[in-house]
């Protein structure tokens, strides 16, 4: 079995152990350094854009007028990923607005 060298993003120790998985299947690791505050972390940077904090930063940068390329470069994600978040937001907004008027409460079944 090949061993991938994993470092804690906080203290850079390689003294880490596997620590289960996220709901989306991403491998989680736990830092064994007792002096380190960052106890559990992920290494799956391909999926950075799925992190709520990254999404929030994408939205904040968009609201402050940053372009897609600037946002992508600053946050270390691909421009396509930024566009994906915008599309998700648009879809969410549409279903949120359309989702309230369809209750058929007069039909008692
Ligand atoms: Zn650490």
Image (cartoon, rainbow, N blue to C red):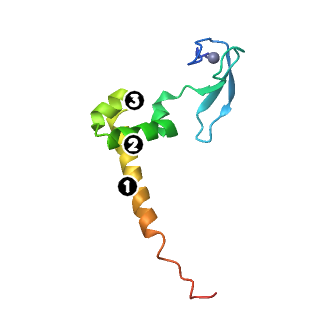
Q: Is residue 71 visible?
A: yes
Q: Which residue is mark 3?
A: 75
Note whether residue 51 is visible: no
Farthest residue, direction front: 64
Residue beneath disc 1: 90
Q: Is residue 44 above or below residue 15?
A: below
Q: Are marks 3 and 2 in contact (CB under 8 Å)?
A: no
Q: Earlier in the sequence, mark 3 or mark 2?
A: 2
Q: Nearer the viewer, mark 3 or mark 2?
A: 2
User: Residue 16: where, in percent of width, then height?
Assistant: 67, 17
Q: Is ligand 1 within 8 Å of the beta carbon of the residue shown at mark 3?
A: no
SS for tag 1?
helix
Task: Verify CB contact (< 8 Å) between mark 3 and mark 1.
Answer: no
Q: Residues within 10 Å of mark 2 (few under 14, many from 20)?
A: some
- Give SS at disc 3: helix
Q: How far is the residue under mark 3 from the one under mark 1?
A: 21 Å
Residue 4: quarter of image: top right
Element at label 2: helix
Query: Counting residues from the N terminus, which is met first, the one under dot 2 or under dot 1?
Result: 2
Ligand 1 rendered quadrant: top right
Residue named by callout 2 = 59
**Cα separation between marks 2 and 1:** 12 Å
């Amino acid at each position: 079995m090949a061993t991938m060298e994993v470092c804690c993003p906080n203290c850079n120790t390689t003294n880490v152990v596997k620590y289960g998985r996220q709901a989306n299947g991403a491998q989680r690791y736990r830092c064994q350094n007792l002096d380190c505050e960052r106890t559990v972390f992920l290494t799956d940077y391909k999926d950075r854009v799925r992190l709520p904090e990254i999404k929030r930063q994408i939205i904040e940068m968009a609201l402050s007028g940053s372009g897609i390329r600037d946002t992508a470069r600053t946050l270390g994600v691909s421009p396509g990923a930024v566009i994906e978040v915008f599309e998700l937001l648009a879809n969410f907004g549409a279903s949120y607005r359309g989702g309230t008027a369809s209750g058929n409460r007069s039909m008692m079944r």
